[in-house]
Image (spheres, rainbow, N blue to C red):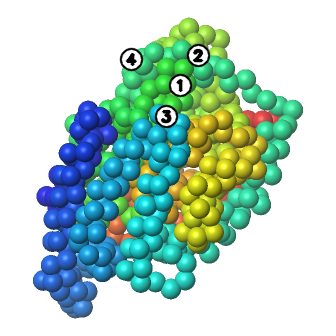
């Protein structure tokens, strides 16, 4: 199964970076075949019997026990699904993703709507096979963040809505506005790449065990701590796309690279989606968007882009790079509005799986929510409802982990500050001190514990979104004073 998974990893990396567009239909068939074989291996009665036995063996070591637990959870998700239906669904999803690309280009939601409806329907049917009581969306949430449900997410987003949203609106409507035209000057791709390569050095990512490429949607994937691959995209008229998405993906990449080699080839490489996102956000927001980071590294940016940065101080760059304003797309959102983009997706997913709304109504509902929370209406569906790949890749219950990860990150930040002088480590270009703390407490733990257990071990506390609210209010009060 590890060999099959490795093949799938290599194929999907290739699909997102190098493979020609027309290769999609054949690849979808091959992916279908390989997933079918993984499915069949997993379902072998002797495999299931072995995993169940590990759970009751008195001398099972904790690593094997946790691994068996996680495999069984995955197996139980799909156990009752007939194999042919499962394989067909995987193939359909690959095609849905391809059609979404076309539909997005054509700005034509009607083209993708029936396929999206079909994905949701298939999901619902699979959840029926699995069997559940309560709300189907709760299962999907738990699939991506063990222990999380609508009750926990409602409380989390409720806090953001009550304590953060009014602050965000106040800044957007306030007297202080920051001119961000600097970010939209022309920055040639090759020079941007030089800066991303500089970031790789600053963060101490090992390129002997990693790859950097370009893709339409930046992402990181890895087979083990010795094979970590990530992508960025360069927008020549928008500098933050590569700089901050680069820092973000580098966070994911450091997380994977600093993993424990014991977990290679197992299902214990990562803890959860939220935990992974907490690490990318840590490098992006708490390091890369900090004032001290730009006081230390702005010189390099100014050296690479002397004309664009003429007369700009590190402090001014920091303020401009952190300015907040409503945006139509999630990936361009600033730190402050980002959680609002996620809240919109969460609310819609919840209603879709609760059968309260229909796929045809999505574009209108989407636009209305953007107007309500961010005060602007997407001008077209490509930049609205079709902007993200997730739903068209059959990923549901995943978006909320992005906002959750940011909030985990804030709480880790305050925990780390008790032991590490973060500002000095950044100012003295000693990122290894920060990396080491994260490695010991989080990265090397892999998926040995559930997210809530690991969270308690790191922070000694329960999850509390007020840390994120505090961090953002303090930071943005300083920027907009
Ligand atoms: Zn991420």
Q: Position of residue 166 (x, y in %)?
A: 80, 52
Q: Tell me the mark number nearer the camera, choosing from 3 and 2.
A: 3
Q: Position of residue 384 (x, y in %)?
A: 60, 42
Instruction: Classify 10 Å Cα crowding around label 1: few (below 14), some (14-19), many (20 and above).
Output: many
Where disc 1 sits, the SS reads: loop
Give the vertical position of 355 relative to 379 (above or below): below
Measure how far apart labels 3 and 4 are at the Cα level.
29 Å
Cβ of mark 3 under 8 A from ligand 1: no
- Which residue is located at x 35 percent, y 31 percent? 214
Residue located beneath label 3 in the image? 106
Check disc 2 and report the residue beneath it.
185
Q: Quadrant of residue 186?
A: top right
Q: Quadrant of residue 66?
A: bottom left
**Dot 3: what SS?**
helix
Instruction: Tell me what residue is drawn at x 80 percent, y 40 percent.
Output: 171
Residue 128 visible somewhere in the drawing:
yes
Q: Which residue is mark 4?
A: 190
Is 292 on the left or on the right of 224, as rendered?
Answer: right
Viewer-closest of 394 and 10: 394
Q: Nearer the viewer, mark 3 or mark 4?
A: 3
CB within 8 Å, label 2 to label 1: yes
Which image quarter holds the N terminus? bottom left
Q: Earlier in the sequence, mark 2 or mark 4?
A: 2
Q: Are marks 3 and 1 in contact (CB under 8 Å)?
A: no
465 sits left or right of 114 in the view: right
Q: Residue at x 22, y 46 (%)?
A: 27
The secondary structure type at the circle numbered 4 is helix
Mark 3 or 1: the one toward you: 3
Nearer the N terminus, badge 3 or badge 2?
3
Earlier sequence position, callout 4 versus callout 1: 4
């Amino acid at each position: 199964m590890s060999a099959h998974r490795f093949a799938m990893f290599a194929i999907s990396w290739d699909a997102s970076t190098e493979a020609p567009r027309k290769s999609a239909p054949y690849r979808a068939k091959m992916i279908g075949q390989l997933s079918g074989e993984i499915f069949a291996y997993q379902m072998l009665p002797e495999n299931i019997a072995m995993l169940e036995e590990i759970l009751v063996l008195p001398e099972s070591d904790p690593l094997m026990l946790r691994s068996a637990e996680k495999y069984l959870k995955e197996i139980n998700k799909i156990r009752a699904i007939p194999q042919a239906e499962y394989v067909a669904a995987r193939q359909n999803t690959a095609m849905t993703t391809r059609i979404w690309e076309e539909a997005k280009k054509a700005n034509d939601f009607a083209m993708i709507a029936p396929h999206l409806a079909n994905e949701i329907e298939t999901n619902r049917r699979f959840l029926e096979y699995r069997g559940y009581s309560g709300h189907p969306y709760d299962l999907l949430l738990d699939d991506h963040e063990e222990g999380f449900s609508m009750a926990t997410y409602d409380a989390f987003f409720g806090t953001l809505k009550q304590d953060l949203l009014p602050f965000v609106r106040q800044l957007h409507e306030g007297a202080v506005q920051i001119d961000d035209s600097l970010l939209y000057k022309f920055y040639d791709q090759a020079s941007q790449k030089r800066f991303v390569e500089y970031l790789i050095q600053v963060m101490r990512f090992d390129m002997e065990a990693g790859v950097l490429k370009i893709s339409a949607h930046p992402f990181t994937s890895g087979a083990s701590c010795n094979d970590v691959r990530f992508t960025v995209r360069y927008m020549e008229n928008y500098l933050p796309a590569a700089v901050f998405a680069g820092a973000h993906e580098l966070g994911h990449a450091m997380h994977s690279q600093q993993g424990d080699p014991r977990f290679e080839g197992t299902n214990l490489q990562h803890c959860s989606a939220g935990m992974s996102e907490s690490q990318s956000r840590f490098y992006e927001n708490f390091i890369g968007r900090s004032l001290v980071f730009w006081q230390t590294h702005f010189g390099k940016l100014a050296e690479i882009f002397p004309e664009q940065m003429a007369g700009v101080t590190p402090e001014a760059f920091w303020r401009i790079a952190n300015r907040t304003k409503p945006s139509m797309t999630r990936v361009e959102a600033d730190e402050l509005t980002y959680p609002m983009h996620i809240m919109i997706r969460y609310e819609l997913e919840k209603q879709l799986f609760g059968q309260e709304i229909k796929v045809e109504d999505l574009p209108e509902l989407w636009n209305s929510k953007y107007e309500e929370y961010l005060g602007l209406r997407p001008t077209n569906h490509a930049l609205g409802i079709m902007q993200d790949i997730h739903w068209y890749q059959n990923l549901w219950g995943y978006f909320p982990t992005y906002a959750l990860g940011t909030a985990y990150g804030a709480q880790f930040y305050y925990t780390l500050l008790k032991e590490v002088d973060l500002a000095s480590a950044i100012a003295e270009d000693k990122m290894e001190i920060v990396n080491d703390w994260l490695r010991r407490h989080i990265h090397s733990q892999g998926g040995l514990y559930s997210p809530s257990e690991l969270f308690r071990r790191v922070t000694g506390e329960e999850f509390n979104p007020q840390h994120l609210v505090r961090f953002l209010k303090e930071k943005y009060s300083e920027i907009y004073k």
